[in-house]
Image (cartoon, rainbow, N blue to C red):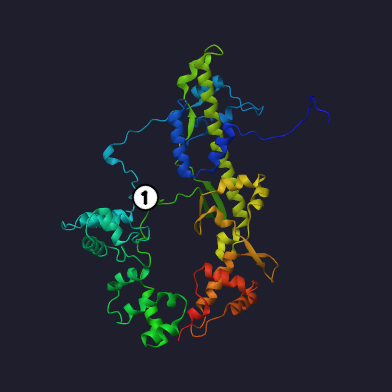
């Protein structure tokens, strides 16, 4: 083998992830609220950025953006002297009206209390007792569903009290609203909620001992154990379903999102769909002219280098925000074209759609569509949905027009069929598959069972009424 050094010249292509490109990708993935927060942070970090007032009177009243001032050579270099000069010549500054503080109405949003806050508030209005601080400790150890995660022995040991005091504290917690919190298992949770049911049958507490049999549909075994009829078991089971197996789930968590702001709004006006990118919460950005004198300094000075660096960063930020707006509009427009029937007629007309379909439609890569639609919402005449809702998967084929149909449509039809069945003679999964086939939705029995489980619909034996 011959070893040695040599020089070879070859041409390759590779993508270099520059800080600017990384920032553009980050901005594309942000929702409207996240982008607003991000811009506020950039305004604090970059002194050359400022918010600008927009005038709706005429085009000349709007301050030119950096993108409008860039040369035509695609190098994204900006003649900053001309930019500042044009600002002086063309910008019409609007008078700012000072509003009396007494006349201002800021949109305050009250956060929903967490389960911990709700329970502690009730405890603090209780009369003082020796077990109050133990009760606070218990409340602090409830999970999101309201169940106690410790044993009484652990509580007594951790709080340095007797077992009886811990038991007294737990009894106090279990009287709080919502009923069922502080339970150590599902049976205890439901038993604590029995006072909610007025004049419940005496057999109901005994039925709670057979929850596993009830979930498995072993009604005959329960009827034999309680010495009642199967129809009576079903009657008691209907009462159990009125109770909440997770009493704490209706409360928010510390970091939960309280509301949704759509990133795109679609409205139908005179039969035509209008698309609006909702970035009203994002400040409109411009360049602060106070730093223009620094551009007249000699090349290479630290001050000029700093200003040029911040100017380029500001330029890229403004361009990235504009590109995000344009990409969102293109994606939303493609979705409207693809899902027009859904927007006009409802979910039964939702068509199968993939990221690739939209990417080919607007001429970008699939990853760009994925980033643009990630964790974003779109408001339509049919309601507010996540973007990913419109990327419905397909399954089976319609015998009528040989076009794919979505799983959401099949589930909706399946639910309608089950809701209209005879409860004394419910359909089997095979029968459901046959009925779907009659409606031009051909799927297997196993798929029917899968969809039924995903929708939380019980099996035939459990749905049967006697």
For image coordinates 42% across by 86% down, the residue present is 230
**Most foreground residue, 368 or 287:** 368
Q: For residue 134, what is the image quadrant?
A: bottom left
The correct choice, above or below, for 371 with respect to 411 in the image is above
The correct choice, above or below, for 326 with respect to 411 in the image is above
**Residue corresponding to mark 1:** 254
Q: Under tag 1, what secondary structure?
A: loop
**Most foreground residue, 25 or 159:** 159
Q: Residue furthest top?
A: 298
Q: For residue 138, what is the image quadrant?
A: bottom left
For image coordinates 56% across by 72% down, the residue present is 414
Q: Position of residue 42 (x, y in %)?
A: 46, 32
Horizontal side of 284 relative to 140 (left or right) equals: right
For image coordinates 61% across by 34% down, the residue present is 17
Total residue callouts: 1
Q: Position of residue 11 (x, y in %)?
A: 76, 31
Instruction: Residue 119: tell me if it is visible.
Output: no
**Most foreground residue, 136 or 159:** 159
Q: Position of residue 310 (x, y in %)?
A: 51, 25
Q: Residue furthest front?
A: 1
Q: Position of residue 145 (x, y in %)?
A: 37, 61
For image coordinates 58% across by 50% down, the residue present is 332
Q: Residue furthest left?
A: 128
**Most foreground residue, 291 or 304:** 304
Quarter placement of the N terminus: top right
Instruction: Residue 413: tell me if it is visible.
Output: yes
Quarter placement of the C terminus: bottom left
């Amino acid at each position: 083998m011959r070893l040695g050094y040599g020089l070879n010249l070859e041409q390759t292509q590779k993508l270099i992830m520059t800080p600017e490109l990384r920032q553009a990708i980050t901005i594309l993935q942000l929702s409207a609220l996240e982008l607003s927060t991000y811009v506020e942070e950039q305004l604090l970090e970059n002194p050359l950025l400022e918010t600008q007032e927009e005038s709706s009177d005429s085009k000349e009243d709007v301050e030119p953006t950096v993108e409008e001032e860039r040369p035509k050579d695609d190098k994204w270099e900006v003649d900053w002297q001309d930019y500042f000069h044009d600002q002086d010549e063309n910008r019409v500054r609007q008078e700012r009206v000072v509003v009396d503080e007494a006349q201002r109405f800021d949109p305050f949003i009250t956060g929903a209390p967490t389960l911990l806050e709700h329970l502690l508030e009730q405890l603090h209005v209780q009369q003082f007792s020796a077990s109050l601080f133990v009760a606070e400790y218990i409340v602090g150890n409830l999970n999101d569903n309201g169940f106690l995660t410790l044993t009484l022995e652990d509580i007594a040991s951790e709080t340095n009290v007797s077992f009886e005091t811990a038991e007294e504290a737990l009894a106090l917690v279990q009287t709080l609203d919502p009923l069922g919190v502080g339970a150590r298992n599902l049976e205890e949770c439901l038993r604590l909620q029995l006072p909610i049911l007025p004049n419940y049958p005496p057999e109901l507490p005994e039925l709670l001992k057979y929850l596993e049999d009830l979930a498995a549909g072993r009604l005959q075994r329960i009827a034999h154990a309680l010495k009642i009829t199967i129809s009576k078991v079903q009657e008691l089971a209907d009462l159990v379903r009125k109770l909440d197996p997770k009493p704490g789930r209706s409360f928010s968590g510390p970091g939960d999102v309280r509301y949704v702001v759509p990133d795109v709004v679609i409205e139908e006006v005179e039969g035509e769909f209008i698309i609006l990118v909702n970035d009203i919460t994002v400040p409109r950005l411009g360049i602060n002219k106070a730093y223009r004198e620094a551009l007249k300094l000699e090349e290479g000075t630290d001050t000029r280098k700093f200003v040029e660096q911040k100017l380029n960063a500001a330029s890229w930020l403004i361009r990235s925000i504009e590109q995000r707006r344009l990409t969102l509009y293109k994606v939303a427009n493609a979705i409207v074209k693809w899902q027009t029937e859904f927007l006009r007629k409802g979910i039964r007309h939702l068509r199968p759609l993939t990221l690739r379909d939209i990417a080919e439609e607007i001429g970008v890569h699939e990853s760009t569509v994925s980033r643009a639609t990630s964790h974003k919402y779109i408001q339509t005449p049919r309601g507010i949905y996540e973007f990913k809702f419109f990327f419905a998967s397909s399954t089976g084929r319609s015998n009528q027009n040989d076009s794919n149909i979505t799983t959401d449509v099949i589930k909706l039809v399946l639910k309608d069929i089950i809701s209209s069945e005879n409860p004394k003679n419910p359909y089997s999964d095979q029968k459901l598959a046959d009925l779907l086939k009659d409606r031009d939705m051909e799927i297997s029995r196993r798929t029917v069972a899968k969809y039924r489980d995903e929708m939380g619909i019980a099996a035939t034996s459990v749905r049967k009424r006697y």
